[in-house]
Amino acid sequence: MMKLVYKLQAEDYKFDFPVSYLPGPVKASIQERVLPDSPLYHNKVQFPATGGLGLNLALNPFEYYMFFFALSLITQKPLPGTLHIRTSDCAYFILVDRYLSWFLPTEGSVLPALSSSPGGPNPSPAPRTPTMPFASYGLHHTSLLKRHISHQTSVNADPASHEIWRSETLLQVFVEMWLHHYSLEMYQKLQSPHAKLEVLHYRLSVSSALHSPAQPSLQALHAYQESFTPTEEHVLVVRLLLKHLHAFSNSLKPEQVSPSTHSHATSPLEEFKRAAVPRFVQQKLYLFLQHCFGHWPLDASFRAVLEMWLSYLQPWRYAPEKQAQSSDCQARCVSERWAPFVQENLLMYTKLFVGFLSRALRTDLVSPKNALMVFRVAKVFAQPNLAEMIQKGEQLFLEPELVIPHRQHRLFTAPTFTGSFLSSWPPAVTDASFKVKSHVYSLEGQDCKYTPMFGPEVRTLVLRLAQLITQAKQTAKSISDQCGESTAGRPFLSWLGFCSTDTNGSYAANDLDEMGQDSVRKTDEYLEKALEYLCQMFRLSEAQLTQLTLALGTTQDENGKKQLPDCVVGEDGLVLTPLGRYQIINGLRRFDIEYQGDSELQPIRSYEIASLVRVLFRLSSAINRRFAGPMAALCSRADFLGSFCRYHLTEPGLADRHLLSPVARGCAARRPRGPRLSLRFLGSYRTLLSLLLAFFVASLFCIGPLPCALLLVLGYLLYAVAMTLLTERSKLHHL
């Protein structure tokens, strides 16, 4: 394919790419006759004579192919739910990886020769002319556009600069098509409290059919912010782009990193390495991440967004010297070399960290996947020296502003891409405080209110997260103990029906019950390490953590048994306190709840045969109606026969049961139950399986069905006599 593209590139022919395929902000800007800031669109927009319909971009073959290649990621059809394919195994993901490796090389000062491309040997395209995109960045555009680009500098005439135009085009196309779906102007408008109030009114008016249609201005306010929703595959490909960009930018030689060493002898590819991330990626990526943090569902799929964010925050992971570092992860420290990157991307670290905190406080941290995400963020931010760099950046931003003209701010914060970035560079800005302020103001606006990451507000959020982590650890432990007790307390004979069946159900927990003890252990490890890292970052003391634990009431009795939920004794019994309600909701404590109604009317269980249970209920009801008098007379006798009948025909009294609620106690008192026969136990799979197993074992000893049945009846009678004697003795003991 690339061989054909290069072959067409040799011909001076343009292909039309519909503007309607472009991301929302770009499409709206062009339709309003306003040229986007990116040089990618300069001298390419074709306006029809009839008006705003049918707008196209005139692209050369390479640009045309790359635009459609990038477009296919955001217009793909979702895969069927039953088809699970790893994104890294898809042909598209592999192609993106190869294109980025080829056009953003980490070795050498020039691109590889075109003849060595994967497509095989092919002739080099014709030399670029001023009509081709790279040179056209410096030319004047049509007068129909409202935004006139002035003070344009001439394009570098160095022939070497013509060799990287494909790299520049590739990066700009990927960034525009994959990241530029949210408008900076709209984002800054939405930061004000008044705009947020309008947002709420707009959403309510849209969701309610009784309201009048929303105002057009409000609709326009949300046109770009909520129309595009990225997929998980989209995010994974963007993460791949960021990893390649870090490797590409960090492949500069040490003497070429500082802008002060910039000279005309520096190759265009090396200049591109220095400018790629801050000039093309930073702003659009920040808006993309902000939208994902605010709109992504609160589930485990957010892991893809999280890893993309963390990959951008750690350029040192992709530096060439990474391989020479020690393998000891604990001793690895973030070098001071990365302080400028941290300062010039301060909001990526601080504001998005606060956004993650707000998400973490609304998720179930007992889930291993959610616990892993908290652990990953805490581990990255707890890297030695990183927190100090962030604090230093915040100090630079919060320094009193001396004499920084407003116009200078706007010039630095919103640079216009009037020509190729390879044209004459602006003067190097050495004031670190000015750089940090410009970064924040350019993204958040001049009137933004910055919340320091290590200030009291964020520290309060971190304490709340530490509290939730402590709760989640206790909940996971209680779930683990509950699973262990239920498994250990169920003997083998219970599966055969010889032991009592639990008809009250089991404690409903979360998905840890299905994942097993290993997931509980992993969750506990993730949360324990995350809490440790947060304590390192924000200097939380052991006394503070102990106070949080005690405030939650998650301590246990000295004998290790779980306490009842926090409650007080009222006139009608136990009354839950707000703390007790919180403990029940989060699974920290619980009451031992038993079924207190008519045992014959319980819902049919999964281990019972529904039709057989109904037949047995009708049969036992008929027997009880027919012989109600004789059974009552037998149970009223004071001799052994009366005790034997009472053991089989009556239920345990209310006094023998656990504490009932006042309402249930009153209802039970109004429903006295006489002696009755219950045959429901014969409808259980386990009872029938036990009988079949008994007959099978008897047949091995040449015992027929009838003698076997007589033996079973005789054995049960002996068991019933023994239980009757024990029951009567226990009653005499209580008296």
Image: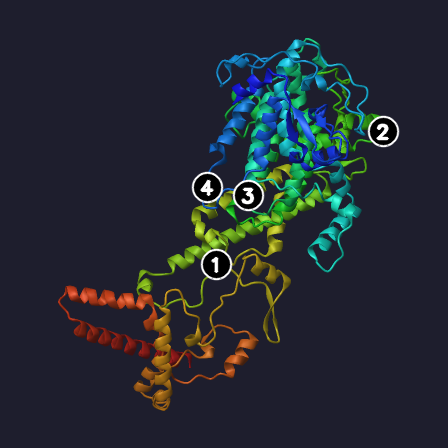
Q: Where residue 301 is drawn, which disc sits there? A: 3
158 or 386, nearer to the observer: 158
**Looking at the image, is mark 2 or mark 1 earlier in the sequence?**
2
Residue highlighted by disc 1: 559
Give, as a three-letter code, the residue at label 1: Asn
**Looking at the image, is mark 2 or mark 4 earlier in the sequence?**
4
Question: For this view, does 82 lie left or right of residue 710?
Answer: right
Q: Residues within 10 Å of mark 4 (few under 14, many from 20)?
A: few
80 or 435, nearer to the observer: 80
Q: Residues within 10 Å of mark 1 (few under 14, many from 20)?
A: few
Question: For this view, does 190 lie left or right of residue 593?
Answer: right
Could you tell me how far apart the alpha carbons at marks 2 and 4 are, in whole angstroms?
Answer: 54 Å
> Mark 4: which secondary structure?
loop
* Residue at image coords 54%, 30%: 330
Q: Residues within 10 Å of mark 2 (few under 14, many from 20)?
A: few
> Can residue 550 be spotted in the picture?
yes
Q: Is residue 62 above or below residue 512?
A: above
Give, as a three-letter code, the residue at label 4: His
> Mark 2: which secondary structure?
helix
Give, as a three-letter code, the residue at label 3: Ser
Residue highlighted by disc 2: 406
Which is closer to the viewer, label 2 or label 1?
2
Residue highlighted by disc 4: 84
Q: Is residue 546 above or below residue 450?
A: below
Could you tell me how far apart the alpha carbons at marks 2 and 1 are, in whole angstroms?
Answer: 69 Å
Could you tell me how far apart the alpha carbons at marks 3 and 2 are, in whole angstroms?
Answer: 43 Å
237 or 468, nearer to the observer: 237
**Looking at the image, is mark 3 or mark 2 earlier in the sequence?**
3
Give, as a three-letter code, the residue at label 2: His
**Looking at the image, is mark 4 or mark 1 earlier in the sequence?**
4
